[in-house]
Image: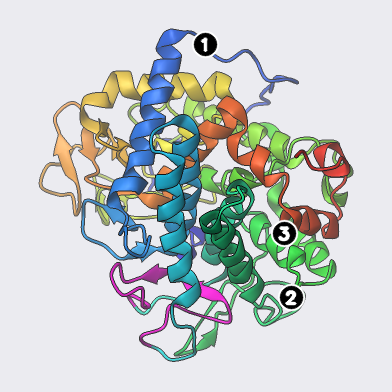
């Protein structure tokens, strides 16, 4: 996920920035909007987003495209989201359990049998890790990309979800469980500690290990939990201590709300898709008096507060249009004093880049944390821009009502009254929507993953205690 970690500094001299004031976050979640109209809206979004994975994937090998309909390579993280999306689809009746099972088995067979090695071409992975991008047909490394530890972890989230969900006593589901176990056990986390006790971002055959490790607070919680839970190549608990010791200035007042900050919203979402952090705490959070789930809830409110403050005078930002995150964008250009970018690691705050691009996944995938503000955002975006941004597979990746410069965009299109609108859906933004909708509605992914022995072990090794983790797993 290297493209998401590197945030661009905002260089524009736009509207004067007012300092954020203290913001009150409800001590308990407020009542979320309910009723038939809300349920119909969420049903439709869930099924359309699921169908992105079901219909865009290569059914032979299970690889999911990074983006669609623009032809692209596969994102290995999107494959992990897809494996979980198939389960959501089976639970909600979008496809049969048997159809989801067969697609999952094809995916896991490919992942297990695909070539691994240190050659620069023709390999799918190395030391059990997978390359960030894979050719949709062959599965070989694409675009000279890196072997990615975090994208592998996101893939493994879906793999382990499948391992725990397909629990029937039949040969096909037994093979799914076996393959999932083998794929996870093969990952050599110790090899990925180029500079102990941290985990490196990645490796490539041309230059070796990348220069940076997973430090600070971001989406890499899942990396460390899975590395600590490995039965074959586990990291020592010192890895988690190293990880939390690097939170540094991430803790503080962000938009007037005290929490561990990470400017793009996806960093507060990804690990939470597969791990239910409600009621469990590590030493770091015990000292601060709340859990990581509450931290993400506060981050959602901070994002909303940033949109209300709207320091860059972005068109559309407000209490029901919020959630700055990594996404597509209109162009790499400076126009009328504003700096715009195509794909960028957007985030809120003075140290991060924002060009008024709205990615619906920012709010929609926060629904499990703060449905009382996420559901109105989903409804508002559909009501105001739905004709342009809501289509066959739910929300297109991004749009920018501030960018109205027809003919200046490098991708997408400029629509009168809506500004720039993306052409594509992105797998890594679709996945959090369908899975977090499921977690909000019936704890679908969390309920299954609370039983997974590797996740439970990883959390305990990291020092988490409390809540469901201290109880015996449900049968």
Q: Secondary structure at mark 3?
A: helix
| C-alpha distance separating marks 2 and 3 | 14 Å
Residue 223: x and y in percent read: 65, 62
Relative to 56, is 443 above or below?
above
Dominant secondary-structure state across the stretch colored magenta: loop
Q: Which residue is mark 2?
A: 232
Look at 85% across and 42% down and name the residue there. Answer: 472
- Give the residues in magenta: 121-143
Residue 34 badge: 1
Q: Is residue 19 visible?
A: no
Quick one: 289 or 226, which is closer to the camera?
A: 226
| C-alpha distance separating marks 3 and 1 | 35 Å
Quick one: 377 or 271, which is closer to the camera?
A: 271
Check disc 2: other Cα within 10 Å, few if <14, some if 14-19, many if 20+: some
Residue 234: x and y in percent read: 76, 72
Relative to 442, is 222 above or below?
below
Q: Which residue is mark 3?
A: 225
Check disc 3: other Cα within 10 Å, few if <14, some if 14-19, many if 20+: many
């Amino acid at each position: 996920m290297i493209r998401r970690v590197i945030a661009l500094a905002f260089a524009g001299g736009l509207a004067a920035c007012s300092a954020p004031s203290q913001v009150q976050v409800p001590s308990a979640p407020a009542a979320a909007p309910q009723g038939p109209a809300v349920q119909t809206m969420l049903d439709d979004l869930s099924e359309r987003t699921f169908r992105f994975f079901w219909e865009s994937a290569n059914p032979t090998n299970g690889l999911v495209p990074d983006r669609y309909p623009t032809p692209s390579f596969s994102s290995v993280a999107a494959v992990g989201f897809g494996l979980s999306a198939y389960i959501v689809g089976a639970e909600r009746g979008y496809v049969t359990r048997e159809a989801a099972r067969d697609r999952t088995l094809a995916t896991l067979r490919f992942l297990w049998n695909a070539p691994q090695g240190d050659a620069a071409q023709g390999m799918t992975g190395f030391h059990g890790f997978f390359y960030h991008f894979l050719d949709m047909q062959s599965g070989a490394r694409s675009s000279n990309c890196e072997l990615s530890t975090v994208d592998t972890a996101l893939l493994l989230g879906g793999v382990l979800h499948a391992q725990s969900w397909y629990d029937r006593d039949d040969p096909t589901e037994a093979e799914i469980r076996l393959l999932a176990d083998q794929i996870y056990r093969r990952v050599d986390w110790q090899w990925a500690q180029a500079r102990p006790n941290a985990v490196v971002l990645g490796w490539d055959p041309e230059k070796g290990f990348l220069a940076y490790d997973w430090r600070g607070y971001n989406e890499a919680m899942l990396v460390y939990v899975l590395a600590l839970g490995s039965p074959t190549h586990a990291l020592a608990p010192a890895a988690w201590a190293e990880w939390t010791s690097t939170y540094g200035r991430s803790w503080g007042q962000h938009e007037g709300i005290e929490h561990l900050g990470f400017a793009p919203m996806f960093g507060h979402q990804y690990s939470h898709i597969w791990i239910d952090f409600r009621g469990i705490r590590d030493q770091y959070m015990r000292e601060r008096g709340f859990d990581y789930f509450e931290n993400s809830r506060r981050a959602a409110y901070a994002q909303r507060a940033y949109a209300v403050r709207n320091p860059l005078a972005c068109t559309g930002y407000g209490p029901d249009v919020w959630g700055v995150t990594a996404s597509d964008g209109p162009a790499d250009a400076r126009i009328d004093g504003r700096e715009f970018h195509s794909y960028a690691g957007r985030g809120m705050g003075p140290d991060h880049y924002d060009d008024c691009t709205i990615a619906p996944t920012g709010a929609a995938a926060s629904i499990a944390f703060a449905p009382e503000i996420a559901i109105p955002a989903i409804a508002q975006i559909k009501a105001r821009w739905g004709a342009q941004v809501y289509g066959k597979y739910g929300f297109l990746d991004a749009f920018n009502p501030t960018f109205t410069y027809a003919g200046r965009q490098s991708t997408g299109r400029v629509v009168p009254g809506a500004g720039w609108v993306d052409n594509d859906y992105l797998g890594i933004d679709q996945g959090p929507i369908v899975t977090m909708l499921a977690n909000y509605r019936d704890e679908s992914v969390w309920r299954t993953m609370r039983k997974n022995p590797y996740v439970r072990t990883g959390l305990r090794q990291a020092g988490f205690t409390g809540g469901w983790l201290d109880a015996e797993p449900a049968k």
